[in-house]
Image (cartoon, rainbow, N blue to C red):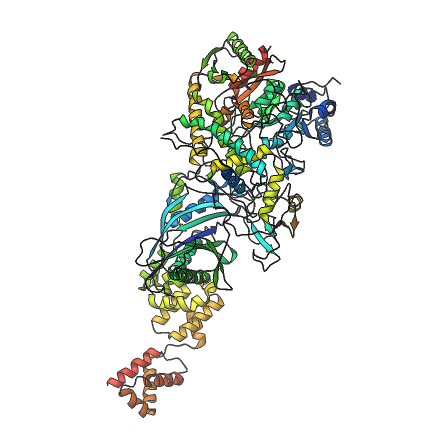
Amino acid sequence: MSLPDGWVMVIGLEVHCELKTATKLFCGCPNMFGDDPNTNVCPTCLGLPGSLPVLNHEAVELAMRIGAALNCDILESTFHRKNYFYPDMPKDYQVSQYDEPINLNGWLDLPDGFRVGVTRAHIEEDTGKSTHVGGDGRIHGATHSLVDYNRSGVPLVEIVSEPDMRNADQARAYVTELRAILVATGASDGRMEEGSMRVDANISVRRSENDEFGTRCEIKNVNSIRSLGRAIEYEAARQIALIEAGDRVIQETRHWNEDQGRTITGRVKEDADDYRYFLEPDLVPLDPSSEWIASVRAGLAVLPATRREAVAAATGADAAATAVATVVDLELDRLVIAAVDAGADGRIALARASNEVAAEADAGRALDASAFTALVKMESAGELTATQAKTVLGELLAGGGGDPKTIAAKHGFEAMDTGALDSIVDEIITANPNEWQRYKDGDGKVTGFFVGQVMKATGGQADGKAVTAALVARAKG
Amino acid sequence: MSPTPSTAVDIAAAVRAGDVSAAEVVETHLAAIDAREAELHACNAVLADQARAAATRIDAARAAGETLGPLAGVPVALKDNMCTRGIPTTCSSKILEGWRPPYDATVVTKLQEAGAIVIAKTNLDEFAMGSSTENSAFGPTKNPHDITKVPGGSSGGSAVAVAAGFAPIALGSDTGGSIRQPAALCGVVGLKPTYGAVSRYGLVAFASSLDQIGPFAGTVADAAATYNVIAGHDRRDSTSYMEPLTPISEADLAGDVSGMRVGIISELLGEGIADDVKRRLTEAADALSAAGAKVEETSVPACIYGLSAYYLIAPAEASSNLARYDGVRYGLRVDADNITGMYTATRSAGFGPEVKRRIMLGTYALSAGYYDAYYGKALKVRSLIARDFATAYEKFDVLLSPTAPTTAFGFGAKTDNPLAMYLSDVCTIPSNLCGDPAISVPFGTGDDGLPVGVQVLAPALGEPALFRVAAALEGSAP
Amino acid sequence: MATPMAKRLTREEVAHVALLARLVVTEAELDMFTGQLADILEHANDVEALDVSGVDAMAHPLRLRNVFRDDVIEPTLDRDEVLSQAPAAEDGRFRVPRILGEAP
């Protein structure tokens, strides 16, 4: 969807991701999704009177990895209390980071090269979870709510982007790339459907000739990358319609309703959100040593962008190409690189990996690289046609490995020798003089007929490309 | 069997030697409680069954030849803002009436591991906010020296428990003077340790950067013995000192102050301090001089701003610490049609007026538009106070001041005017702001015959010097 | 120069603060609290004269930094013991009256 002429949309994204630690941010309760309610709780994450927080070392390590992966400055930081009342908050304040966060001033490049600024990525604790009873599960219409504190205290990193995105595609690409980075660093498993990665979008619109940003709305409850796109497009259209009708956009939090396909006004603001931030007196400052920071940066996993560049360089494809992104996304790039390193044709390696192997990605990740390499070499040497190669590959994947030559032999996929092919082509030409005449007169459509006939005659063993070449040669001479 | 000794140190020695059984010790103290508790109301709960069971275990351990802890058989009373598993911990508030914590405070575990026997949970000003124990939701505690007078606060119950012989030692908490001031008014020893020396895990928080748990005792030696058990690093408290702390030694308790430099804080001898209290302070200073200390007056200029800074910082932290009392997970709930209504109905019914006052004051001090002028500025004033004390400690080993401006006042004397009540803490507040230790030692009586306390202050981790001077004062007290 | 402190505290400000703190006060209490709080804040004005320019805020007495725990599981509480203290529980969860709005 594109905006109507004369309008610009401004998008900033806040992504909360749960860190993949064994325990919670401030206590030793298991960090586990899906357990029985209120079985992973203790005085600290229940906020019982007298309880105190102690910072999880691993959570800091993972937060620093995120900062490093997003090109941030990693700084000395402090924790603050964000005070507000809500039943999923056991202390009625959230321990977060305010004006001295751990990670600042980074960026993330989208696959097409567009750079989105990352303002900050800070550490905070998660809240419990409420379920609303009596209505249709939503807050409005509920008679009461039930609260589970298993999630309370789970470590989060909140990643705030600069408002650099201008359309839904960029927003989706940002979230996709960010997710891949989070997974690559081991910091998070990025499962939006489980809530381990949550995206809120801040959206405003303005007329192109205006310099100032328009009033923005925050959109919450977006549960998938696809919903993100839909929500952004809906919201932009809603705001534009309001402004064109002479109304103002009210700054507020709205909720995306997936079923109805629209955003709905959220909280009624009964008091301005005065969080009364102050330094958390139960914690001390966090000042990671330069050695620790250096080791995090040095030890950072290879990020998706680097892997895409490697695939591009090896295969001659464009780093922004879909096939390249697919192969890296599904962690099949190792196969492609191994094949090219062993002298196989990069283009074919990429094609097979991004199509046939991608379709069976789990099997593909387990596939022996040398088997894949051998297969690609057989195809590029003409020993197998593309069709035959796909068949062999399918069996390699289904069988969890094997030897391509053996499989090919089993199917009787011998390379056709040129002499045999030539005589068959000559026979078909002789048997179909009218069609041959049309071919010689330039009717390209007849090519398919001849190729088909040759295929039939050879039981599918002819290489389509070789047949076409043979026809061309005969038409000339 | 011998009669039960009266000090913790002697009881522990007697129990260890087999001269008296832990069971007898407990009975003696339960009898003392029986005799005066109805009159004094120091206790929110008397834990007779649990104490007897603990005594039985100690006696059995001794009979089996096991090594006993340093406080084995010693009854201890705990201020009712320290979590005791399965036993109501109310903070003397309606909002926590009947709440049974599912865990023990670290200090409780340490005391029990040392063999001490928890005999009572004591009364306090609600959520430790007050200087007279009149703010308790369950009725005030009376001063055993004169039951028309307050015992001080907020740890009034613990001070009285020791003063009236219910237990030789008790624990209190001190945020602005809540151990030292009641100790002075009740004529017992009360120590506020260095911030971070004693774990706060399990202490219901009032003001997190100011709160510390400390001992009440009838003697300086008992206070030291208790401090030695409860002090030390706790991995559950991020604000707990990491390095091992120096225990108070016999040498410290010998009280040899010759050559020590003692500074009398001139700002704390001003008009707000009663004449009889000033006289006792002068006598105390003279006693230290006579014992070989070098005593002179000194100025700590910024300490007069302590009250102002404290009454912005403490309520600000309290307003956040007390937000969790919302009727959702434990404690009082007053139902309503919706959650916000439930919050306000519960908190309005559950908190007393002093607590509400401080929550509102603190909320205001932190709120948008006022942060810099109030809370933000108070934090800078705090720096100035700390700086002036640090300067004084370059020239002096310890400082001296009265603990409280007057002897115990009568019930209702200050309840109409919160500000007047707050002025009770003028001498004690600076140590909390700086995080430094201070101890109150009884030193004679006022013109009305009521106890007077003298305060000794030291820099952070200066407890050994503190106890040295305290022991000297105890030895020369009138 | 130091930021001047606010003028004497008003009833409206106290009412707003009570709302933020989820406290309900009667009209009479509002008057009483306003007077008392205003007195306390005015007393705090004695720091107005203090020059704090160039002074760092001291939010905490300790110089400690970097206190951590290892990422190791510890015993959790027994749910029954926890819920036994709950004012209302249902299905292993804490039950609360209906919530009117989403979280901030």
The x and y percentages for residue A355 are 41, 68
Question: Where on the picture, by quarter, is residue B88?
Answer: top right
User: How many numbered discs, if any?
Assistant: 0
Q: In this view, does A344 lie above or below A180?
A: below
The x and y percentages for residue A352 are 39, 68
Residue at the extreme top: B290
Q: Is residue B421 above or below residue C12?
A: above
Residue drawn at (56%, 28%) of the image: B418
Residue drawn at (50%, 33%) of the image: B239
Q: Is residue B378 left or right of residue A135?
A: left
Residue at the extreme right: B1
The x and y percentages for residue A419 are 32, 82
Q: Nearer the viewer, residue A197 or B12?
A: A197
Q: Is residue A146 left or right of residue A83?
A: right
Quarter of the image for the N terminus of chain C: give it.
top left
The x and y percentages for residue A210 are 31, 56
Q: Is residue B344 visible?
A: yes
Q: Which of B244 and B209 is in front in this view?
A: B209
Q: Can residue B311 be seen in this view?
A: no
